[in-house]
Amino acid sequence: AYHFPGNTWCQDWMQYLSNTHTVLGLFFHHPLHPMRFQERLVILIGSIAIGLTISNLTYLYFIRNGFAVEEEVFTLNSHHTEYTGIPVVSITTLMITLWTLGSFLHTCFDLGLWHMKACTICRYQGRIDERTVQWGRVAGLFIVMISIFSGGYAVLLRAGIEYKGEGSVAEEVQESIMGNEVYHVKFEDPRSFKFLLGYLVEFVLALFVYYPLAVTILFSGVLGFGRFPLLGGRPREMKRESQYELSKREPKILKAANIESEEHINGIVGDDGSMDDYKTMSYRDDESRSRFDDSHII
């Protein structure tokens, strides 16, 4: 939920982020939230797998189309290395692509997978279809498994290219990629997995920069103009809460008004059934209105 009764904007935002975040949600989700730890762990595994898939398929795409993978765009700390002892960091075109487009796609996948596993649409308007919820979780698990297999294959291909020592199969892998052929991975092939350290940057950016930004946009309701399910955000939840509170008050107001009317009529009709005093009274009379106070509206 985007809103809990009585919460401020910041409290609702923190609650929503802690419930939906791929990592933080494992430890800080609300105790009554329907998504359990096991389901959240599956989402985290899927997030890691899709991140590896995106980063390594992007690398293979650069290889396939002849883009320079190591092309330097700019450097960091190039003028202070002698004083700080920190080595120069070269920022390449591949890095920028992964840290922007790659992290954005990673975040979109995480949000989509979370809403699929939680079956957010199934829970609107207080109606929960348990069969649909189960199908959503099974579909999410299937997507996670596909991500694991595709990510693992892409990692093995890149690891084979990265290794440049004796027995390297880098040229064979690149030739198969250039020729749009499927390379049959051999487990005895020498590989280098040092590139996985660079993946941590993309993972951190996706989960702790892009994800909070995306959650804030959804939470604000700007995508759904505060009206549409899922995209309406907190404004839609606030509006629905107001409508619900009003719907609870209206029957009580009508009931109180009917009781007051009956008491009022009984009080002004004489023992002989005469209505003369009633005819002289007005519904705008201050004394008659004074008995209908705020205590009737709960």
Image (cartoon, rainbow, N blue to C red):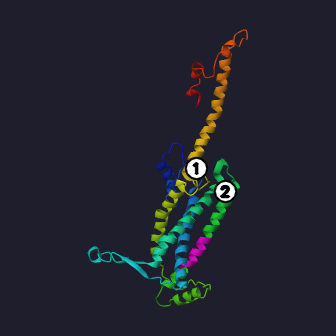
Residue 220 position in % (x across, y down):
52, 54
**Within-10-Å neighbours for mark 1: few <14, some 14–19, many 20+:** many
Q: Which residue is mark 1?
A: 236
Q: Residue at x 63, y 20 (%)?
A: 282
Q: Nearer the viewer, mark 2 or mark 1?
A: 1
SS at badge 1: helix
How many callouts does the rendering have? 2
Range drawn in magenta: 146-155
The amino acid type found where label 2 is placed reads Val
Q: Quarter of the image holding residue 248? A: top right
In the displayed structure, 79 sits above or below 1; it is below
In this view, the residue in front, 148 or 251, is 251
**Within-10-Å neighbours for mark 2: few <14, some 14–19, many 20+:** some
Residue 29 position in % (x across, y down):
52, 53
Q: Name the magenta segment's main secondary structure.
A: helix
Q: Residue at x 54, y 84 (%)?
A: 65
Q: Which residue is mark 2?
A: 133
Task: Please say whether residue 198 is one of the residues in the magenta stretch.
Answer: no
In the displayed structure, 24 sits above or below 269; it is below
Task: Please say whether residue 147 is one of the residues in the magenta stretch.
Answer: yes
